[in-house]
């Protein structure tokens, strides 16, 4: 992408478009920008979060493959409403959130060790 213009109000420069939009939303007091795409059978794809996650994992091919695979599975489950695919998608989502929780908890516990 071409160079991202600096903030007109404070002059801050941005490394990527995600930083720029976050800054604009913060200044306006709005909710975070995370567009969603409605899918059949009550599913919804958080396309903004998806793109942000792929961008931040761009140097980790295995992680990008996992993200793309889960997105594809979600699209399939939404379109075909298959029970087994729904279960797999839900398990993957729970696993992803628990992994993030585990790393945050580990970070907090390590912080306590360093403080004591």
Image (cartoon, grey):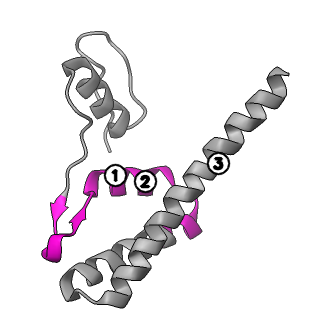
Where is mark 1, residue-wise? 49
Does 110 sit left or right of 107 as displayed?
Answer: right
Quarter containing the N terminus: top left
Q: Residues within 10 Å of mark 3 (few under 14, many from 20)?
A: few
Marks 1,2: beta carbons within 8 A: yes
Question: Which x, y percent locates residue 55?
Answer: 43, 52
Q: Secondary structure at mark 2?
A: helix
- Between 32 and 86, the residue placed more toward the observer is 86
Magenta: main secondary structure equals: helix
Do we see residue 58 in this rendering?
no
Q: Quadrant of residue 46?
A: bottom left
Looking at the rendering, the stretch of residues picked out in magenta corresponds to 37-65
Percent across and percent down for residue 91 are 47, 73
| Cβ atoms at labels 1 and 3 below 8 Å apart | no
Q: Which residue is mark 3?
A: 103
User: Magenta includes 58?
Assistant: yes
Image quadrant where one finds the C terminus: top right
Q: Within 10 Å of the Cα at label 1, are there few (<14), some (14-19), or many (20+) other Cα atoms?
A: some
Gap between marks 2 and 3 measured at Cα: 17 Å
The secondary structure type at the circle numbered 1 is: helix
Q: Please tell me which residue is depicted at 28% across the width and 18% down the height of the picture.
A: 7
6 to 102, vertically: above or below: above
Q: Which mark is residue 1?
A: none
Residue beneath the point at 77% across and 36% down: 110
The mark lying in front, picked from 2 and 3, is 3
Q: Which residue corresponds to mark 2? A: 53
């Amino acid at each position: 992408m071409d160079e991202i213009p600096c903030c007109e109000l404070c002059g801050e420069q941005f490394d990527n478009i995600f930083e720029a939009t976050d800054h604009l939303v913060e200044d306006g007091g709005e909710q975070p920008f995370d567009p969603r795409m409605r899918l059949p059978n009550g599913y919804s794809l958080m396309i903004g979060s998806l793109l942000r996650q792929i961008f931040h994992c761009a140097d980790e091919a295995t992680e990008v493959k996992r993200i793309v695979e889960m997105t594809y599975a979600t699209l399939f489950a939404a379109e075909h409403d298959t029970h087994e695919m729904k279960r797999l998608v839900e398990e993957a989502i729970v696993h992803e959130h628990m992994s993030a929780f585990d790393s945050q908890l580990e970070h907090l516990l390590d912080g306590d060790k360093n403080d004591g």
